Image (tube, helix red, strand yellow):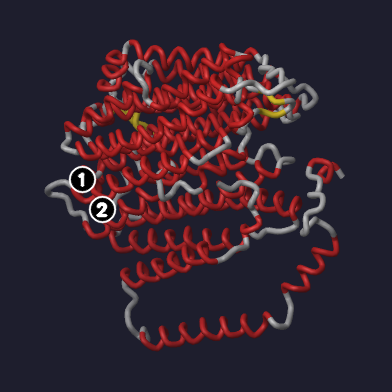
């Protein structure tokens, strides 16, 4: 395997790349203590959805509502980037922000009756796909070397 | 103003992309043959692109792709700066890459694609084009920053640059969405028409959009407080890439910022000038102060490049004819002197690596006087000491600020450049006034390309220092959208 030759694991690093660490991390990811938190989050989302559904019941959806939705998604994404520490999750939050912009573009296209924005959305999707390719490659390359995708571990360069 | 549509506006970019594809193809055909000929092909592509761009100088303003790209003198001037950065980076790269076993065709192909993204950004007259070209130049740069995969710093630079860069492009895109919502168009000229008297723009949306756009472009131009990625990316990336990023990206980002702020929303000037002036002050002061405490020369130069972004932004705040001309001259000199400074860092070898720690520079002026003098010259120019080109660049920017009634901005910037002069001069003091350590022969890098690149940088900085009026005159002719 030439890859391992190109990218030797970091000697002596606490998270050095090996099978045991991966298994431990995989086990930690589905650990039972995480489950209640995930359930609580899902329940909260469901609750919000039900409340919004009741409030908006039989009301005609306006362009403004979609713009507000996009703002909410954008805020969730931006907030996620600021508070989460896993590179993959950060990346997902950034994708959420891009898609919030897509929703805004489509909503505005509907509002102004100008379909140019639909083309823009297609461009954005293509660019986002290219970004995923490059971004995941960078994250994988760094994970191979350090055995961690936590951005707080990136401390080689500091002031 | 009806503008002629013709696809030839895109010829310089087609030359760059064609060169990139050609490089990848010959590498696929003969993967065993890697060497300086790859750099040579890259240089040919860049020069071809420059010649094709040069022919547009005397042409009347033309546009292509349905008004998404505009071929004007401003675009030609900005393209020349960017192509110059690409040319110099390509000259410095082969020896550096060879020493680290990285001489691959992909590097040069990425460099050409990134250059194409930058030049297209400088000529784009539609926000969609701005977004796509920023992504094109950034995606290539993310990979180039992490090209030295075996080195932790390089990987880390790539990751940080990528995450923060993608975060910034999301802001940019959201800004574009709101511009579209407010004006019903993404074309810069039509945005200008809609936001002028008699337009139908929704100013609440456009105001929010301009703020978001400024955040997105501010990230690319590395203005405080959107600069966090810069020191890490510049320090960790391979030095030729750092030189290229520092020169090319900044020129492209400011060309786009000028087109968007000064040309498409001049009617909102009273809204954006204040916040941008605040960012400018923050940038020049903060970057100069932080740079004083740096001991890594590459990182110090990164903070220096942030503070220079602040100086160019002063010219943007001035938002006048003379401001645009001053910004162009500044970007030209800045690119030459900053690539020259990073080139000198590459010149001072230390075993297999390069001297990046300040302490390792002690006595260089005694052992290698010519090279150390060259480095000192670039540093003095960065500090803006007369009679270098850097002095005139700052002079024109301050002059533009005073003429547009922002004299206080010029005064703050002069104060910051006094602080900045300290850390530039300190390197010269360390080189010339400290004794060299025993047993350190201080060999220089002997690559011809690097020497040619340094000579070219020196030529530009000296030329602007000797005949600043000539370059200012050229830049004044190069007003966007033909005036």
Image quarter of residue A25: bottom right
A122 shown above or below B105: below
Instruction: Please name whichever residue, B23 or A112, is drawn nearer the observer in this view of the structure.
Output: B23
B121 shown above or below B85: below
Q: CA distance from mark 2 to mark 1?
A: 17 Å
Residue matched to label 1: B269
Instruction: Kindly report which numbered mark, 2 or 1, lies closer to the viewer in this rendering.
Output: 1
Work out whether residue B48 can be spotted.
Answer: yes
The residue at the point 23 percent across, 60 percent down is: B204
B8 shown above or below A73: above
Q: Secondary structure at mark 2?
A: helix
Name which of mark 2 and mark 1 comes first in the sequence. Answer: 2
Which disc, if any, is residue B183?
A: 2
Task: Pick the quarter of the image with the C terminus of chain B.
Answer: top left
- The chain under label 2 reads B
Could you tell me residue A56's position as x and y percent? 36, 83
């Amino acid at each position: 395997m030439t890859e391992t030759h190109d990218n030797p694991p970091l000697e002596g690093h606490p998270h050095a790349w090996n099978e045991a660490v991966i298994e431990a991390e995989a086990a930690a990811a589905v650990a039972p203590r995480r489950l209640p938190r995930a359930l609580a989050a899902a329940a909260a989302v469901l609750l919000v959805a039900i409340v919004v559904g009741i409030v908006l019941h039989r009301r005609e959806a306006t362009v403004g509502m979609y713009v507000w939705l996009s703002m909410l998604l954008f805020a969730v994404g931006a907030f996620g980037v600021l508070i989460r520490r896993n590179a993959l999750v950060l990346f997902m939050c950034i994708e959420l922000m891009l898609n919030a912009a897509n929703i805004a573009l489509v909503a505005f296209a509907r509002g102004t009756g100008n379909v140019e924005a639909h083309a823009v959305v297609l461009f954005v999707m293509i660019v986002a796909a290219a970004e995923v390719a490059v971004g995941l490659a960078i994250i994988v390359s760094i994970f191979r070397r350090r055995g961690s995708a936590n951005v707080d571990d990136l401390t080689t360069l500091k002031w | 103003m009806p503008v002629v549509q013709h696809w030839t506006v895109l010829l310089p970019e087609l030359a760059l992309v064609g060169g990139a594809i050609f490089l990848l193809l010959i590498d696929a055909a003969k993967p065993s043959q890697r060497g300086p000929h790859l750099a040579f092909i890259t240089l040919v592509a860049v020069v071809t692109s420059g010649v094709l761009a040069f022919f547009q100088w005397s042409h009347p303003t033309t546009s292509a792709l349905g008004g998404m790209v505009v071929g004007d003198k401003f675009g030609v001037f900005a393209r020349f700066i960017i192509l110059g950065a690409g040319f110099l980076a390509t000259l410095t790269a082969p020896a550096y890459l060879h020493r680290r076993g990285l001489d691959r065709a992909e590097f040069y192909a990425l460099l050409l694609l990134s250059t194409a993204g930058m030049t297209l950004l400088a000529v784009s007259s539609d926000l969609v084009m701005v977004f796509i070209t920023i992504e094109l130049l950034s995606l290539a740069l993310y990979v180039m920053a992490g090209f030295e995969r075996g080195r932790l710093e390089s990987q880390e630079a790539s990751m940080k640059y990528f995450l923060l860069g993608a975060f910034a492009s999301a802001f940019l895109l959201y800004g574009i969405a709101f511009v579209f919502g407010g004006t019903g168009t993404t074309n810069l000229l039509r945005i200008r028409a809609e936001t002028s008297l008699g337009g139908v723009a929704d100013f609440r949306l456009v105001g929010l959009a301009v703020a978001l756009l400024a955040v997105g472009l501010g990230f690319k131009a590395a203005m405080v407080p959107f600069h966090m990625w810069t020191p890490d990316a510049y320090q960790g990336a391979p030095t030729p890439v750092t030189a290229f990023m520092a020169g090319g990206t900044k020129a492209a980002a400011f060309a786009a910022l000028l087109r968007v702020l000064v040309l498409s929303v001049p009617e909102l000037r009273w809204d954006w000038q204040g916040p941008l002036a605040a960012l400018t002050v923050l940038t020049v002061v903060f970057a100069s102060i932080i740079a004083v405490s740096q001991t890594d020369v590459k990182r110090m130069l990164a903070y220096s490049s942030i503070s220079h972004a602040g100086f160019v932004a002063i010219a943007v705040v001035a938002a006048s004819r003379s401001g645009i001309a001053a910004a162009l001259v500044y970007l030209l000199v800045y690119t030459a002197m900053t690539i020259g400074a990073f080139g000198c860092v590459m010149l001072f070898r230390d075993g297999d690596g390069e001297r990046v720690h300040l302490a390792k520079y002690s006595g260089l002026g005694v052992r290698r006087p010519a090279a150390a003098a060259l480095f000192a010259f670039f540093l003095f120019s960065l500090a803006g000491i007369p009679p270098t080109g850097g002095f005139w660049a700052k002079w024109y920017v301050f002059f533009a600020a005073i003429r547009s009634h922002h004299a206080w901005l010029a005064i703050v910037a002069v104060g910051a450049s006094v602080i900045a002069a300290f850390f530039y001069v300190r390197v010269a003091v360390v080189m010339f006034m400290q004794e060299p350590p025993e047993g350190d022969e201080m060999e220089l890098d002997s690559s011809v390309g690097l020497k040619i690149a340094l000579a070219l940088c020196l030529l530009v900085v000296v030329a602007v220092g000797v005949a600043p009026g000539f370059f200012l005159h050229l830049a004044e002719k190069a007003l966007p959208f033909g005036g």
